[in-house]
Image (cartoon, grey):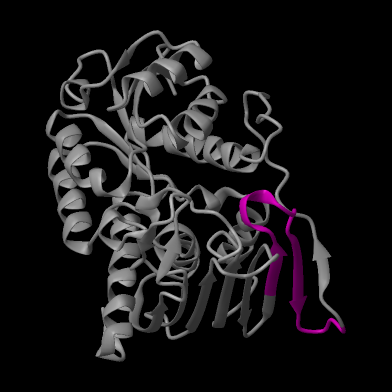
Amino acid sequence: MSTSKPLRVGIIGVGWGSVVQVPAFRMVPEYEVVALCSRQPDRVKAAGDKLGIADVSTDWKRFVTRDDLDIISIATPVDLHHEQTMAAIAAGKDVLVEKPLGLTEAETGAMLKAAEEAGVRHAVCFENRFDPARLRMWELVREGFLGTPYFGMARSGADFWHPSRGLQSEWMYKKDSGGGYLMGMGSHDVDYACALFGDAAAVCADVRVSVPKRPRTDGTFLEVDADDTSTLTIRMANGMTFSIITTAIALQQNFRAFTVFGSEGSLSMEGGVMGAEEPAIKAGSIGQEVPSVIPASERTARSGIEAPKRRAGAAIMALALMLEEWLPAFEGQPTIVPTLYDGHRVQRIVDAARRSSDGAGWVTL
């Protein structure tokens, strides 16, 4: 960045926004988080006190119009993303939006159109692209290691919604609130597949609710209509096939794996969800008897600031690297950062998967 002044960031939402976004922004000196906003006054004040941010607000509609904010970062529940993003864009603000981008492809398409017409910079938090193993695999694919790609598969699972576990936030169990693990966890794999190999052409899927009722501590029951398990088969526009499996009912399991095969090579990695286990990359190529193990990317923040050593540390570092990669956009340069286009592309695939599961069979995109 040629400017000596940091980009001033206002964050709406103090859950993931305060736990992950604030420390990630602080690892990149070209940004400065100057204000927080939340509908809940006690939560936003507590977050501000903890993070040393005195400028807190509960009025997001006024917040997005402030002249002293350059970027509005939206880390609220999914059902608020569309309204808040559209308002920020209308105010001429650059926007960063947590994934999933919206509830439906109609919403995400409108957000993308508005951003393009307004000429603002925009990005979506698919920061998993910048995890060490995924970042290295992405580099290898761009370098042509696979040759012609043939087939890929991704698996993600944990026991977050197994009946032996307590309830998460109730909105997560409601489809019309943006809940479900295809949106919450599988969307990262959908985005990564598209980042590596381009657009999808058609989708066939089973999107399932395995546990339709969950007991509350007060003896009542929560009706569940958001998915805990999904299986997607995707025909990519480049001719390859991709399989993506996501589940939140894997008792005592925590895994995240990604494998791709091509005419010249193969790549695979296995690890855990939320940095539970550092992934190892195996690379096979013609002439080898067995795959070799190659190191993940060792890239860290240019500032030298380390991510906090806690469970969210891996996500914080990945987001910091993504924010570094976003900086050229503010000088009119291209970047590899996921934008609203990518968020809309993922949502189109999610919506197609749901229609397929409801009986439509193969859905063409």
Image location (x, y in percent) of residue 336: 45, 49
Quarter where residue 227 is shown: bottom left
User: Residue at image x 43%, y 37%?
Assistant: 326
Image location (x, y in percent) of residue 74: 32, 36
Query: How many marks do you count on the picture?
Result: 0
Q: Residue furthest right?
A: 289
User: Residue at image x 68%, y 72%?
Assistant: 267
Q: In this view, does 103 lie above or below 332?
A: below
Q: Residue furthest front?
A: 219
Quarter of the image that includes the N terminus: top left
- Front-most of residues 252 and 65: 252
Quarter of the image that includes the C terminus: bottom left
Q: Give the range drawn in magenta.
A: 267-289
- Whether residue 274 is in magenta: the answer is yes
- Front-most of residues 118 and 66: 66
- Whether residue 104 is in magenta: the answer is no
* Left or right, residue 89 beside residue 334: left
* Left or right, residue 234 beside residue 113: right
* Left or right, residue 112 beside residue 259: left
* Left or right, residue 322 beside residue 273: left
Image location (x, y in percent) of residue 205: 39, 83
Quarter where residue 13 is shown: top left
Q: In this view, does 285 lie above or below 54?
A: below
User: Residue at image x 63%, y 81%?
Assistant: 261
- Front-most of residues 99 and 206: 206
Q: In this view, does 140 lie above or below 285?
A: above
User: Residue at image x 25%, y 49%?
Assistant: 79
Image location (x, y in percent) of residue 75: 37, 38
